[in-house]
Image (cartoon, helix red, strand yellow):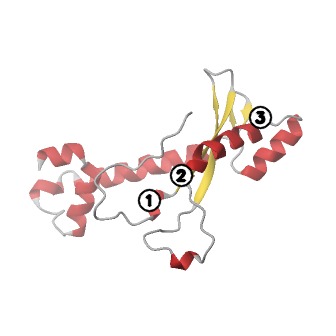
Amino acid sequence: LKDVKDSYPVDLAEYAIENKVADEPAFAWWVNYTIKKKARIIAKIKSKYWLRTHKFGIRVPRTIKEAIEIDDDNKNHEWWDALMIEMKNVRVAFEEHDGDTKDLIGYQEVKCHVIFDIKLGENYRKKARFVAGGHTTDTPSIMTYASVVSRDS
């Protein structure tokens, strides 16, 4: 139990609550603290992400539309170039399907979005990352590895 608690404290705390053993002496002294700490960390990360509009004095977009607007205001295409580089890199991970998407077996719809950032060590290079909401999909029972798309960065 000690090893699991040290390695996966939040998962174990949620397990204890779901299985109604959180009041047992082995769990009672730390389960509530762990759940509250998890909530505080998540709230802090969410608030910082949405409040930050600039990095190193440069405006960072939240959406593709906003990136295009910033490029138009600055009379350049740095955010657009960053987006095109990312789209070229992730293109290999997708397959085209001309038929009805309901015919696809073993595939799930995943919502995706773009995260924009600025790299200090690379002369304030604009960077875009296309990310999928993988947390909203069902994990196959046979998957025993972390699935990651390999690409050049």
The span from disc 2 to disc 3 (Cα, nearest Å) is 24 Å
Res 82 quadrant in image: top right
CB atoms of marks 2 and 3 within 8 Å: no
At a point 87% along the width and 42% down the height, the residue shown is: 72
Mark 2: secondary structure: helix
Q: Nearer the viewer, mark 2 or mark 3?
A: 2
At a point 22% along the width and 55% down the height, the residue shown is: 12
Report which residue position mark 3 lands on. Answer: 78
Res 152 quadrant in image: top right
Q: Position of residue 1 (x, y in %)?
A: 11, 50
The span from disc 1 to disc 2 (Cα, nearest Å) is 18 Å
In the image, is residue 40 above or below residue 126? below
Q: Nearer the viewer, residue 101 or 70?
A: 101
Task: Looking at the image, tell me whether mark 2 or mark 3 is earlier in sequence order.
Answer: 3
Q: Nearer the viewer, mark 1 or mark 2?
A: 2
Report which residue position mark 2 lands on. Answer: 93
The span from disc 1 to disc 3 (Cα, nearest Å) is 30 Å
What amino acid type is highlighted by mark number 1?
A: His
What amino acid type is highlighted by mark number 3?
A: Glu
Task: Looking at the image, tell me whether mark 1 or mark 3 is earlier in sequence order.
Answer: 3
Report which residue position mark 1 lands on. Answer: 135
